[in-house]
Amino acid sequence: MKNIVLFGPPGSGKGTQAEVLKDIYNLVHISTGDVFRYNIKNESTLGKLAKSYMDDGNLVPDDVTINMLKAEVEKHPDVHGFIFDGFPRTESQAKALDVFLNEKNEPIKGMVALEVPEDLLVERLLNRGLTSGRTDDQDVSKIRNRFKEYQTKTAVLQDYYAKQNKYFGVNGVGSIEDITERICQVIDKM
Ligand code: B4P
């Protein structure tokens, strides 16, 4: 099984690339952001809780996110592997994911990290905000708060996976096709 973590700051192209990669490698794509947005749209209890955090660009609490992720994985018992997009985002999420997948004898093969300068990220997110209706993409101060959350809680995961020799940085600037090609060169060697 090929379990891959797609990593990077908000707007780095995780969701965009995961949609392409899932077909190339026949993997199931799990985006925690998408699952939260689905729940918000359906006004579920989980959605109402997540909305209060996401609207301000804050991370949703770990216990909620971890339980949701496990439930999503369990929905797919017979698969070639998963692309985790937007999860883990904290060290405790990463540890929980390791325990969960090791119990299944299907550990993470590697983390692919998309590297994009912050100015370009702001531009991409504001552009998406013009059409997506995502409130977290429409306000520069909320976008900056997401970067702050990323720097203080998420960026440490680079070290977490590097210590396991599972960290692979990829240049995330360029055309979507060129970036996919760079990522495939990394995944093919895992
Ligand atoms: P996510 O839904 O994960 O979204 P994201 O980080 O904003 O974007 P992503 O990197 O996927 O970028 P995309 O491909 O869409 O998170 C949203 C929120 O959910 C978080 O702030 C948090 O509150 C919550 N959440 C999610 N997971 C959580 C967790 N594990 N724990 C706690 N909270 C969690 O690309 C962005 C834009 O760039 C798009 O418009 C795209 O078209 C464009 N783009 C992509 N690639 C491009 C390229 N090569 N060139 C030009 N434009 C490009």
Image (spheres, helix red, strand yellow):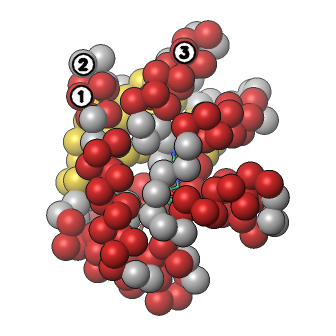
Determine the residue positioned at 48% across, 73% down: 136
Residue at which label 2 appears = 163
Label 2 with label 1: CB-CB less than 8 Å: yes
Residue at which label 1 appears = 159
On screen, residue 171 versus residue 113, left or right, reads left
On screen, residue 116 versus residue 77, left or right, reads left
Could you tell me residue 189's position as x and y percent? 32, 28
Q: Which class describes the residues within 10 Å of circle 1: few (<14), some (14-19), or many (20+)?
A: few
Amino acid type of the residue tagged 3 in the rendering: Val
Could you tell me residue 43's position as x and y percent? 80, 65
Q: Quadrant of the N terminus?
A: top right
Residue at mark 2 to residue at mark 3: CA–CA distance: 16 Å
Residue at which label 3 appears = 99
Residue at mark 3 to residue at mark 1: CA–CA distance: 18 Å
Under circle 1, the secondary element is helix
Residue closer to the observer: 182 or 117: 117
Residue at mark 2 to residue at mark 1: CA–CA distance: 6 Å
Determine the residue positioned at 40% across, 81% down: 139
Disc number at residue 151? none
Image quadrant in which you'd find residue 180 = bottom left
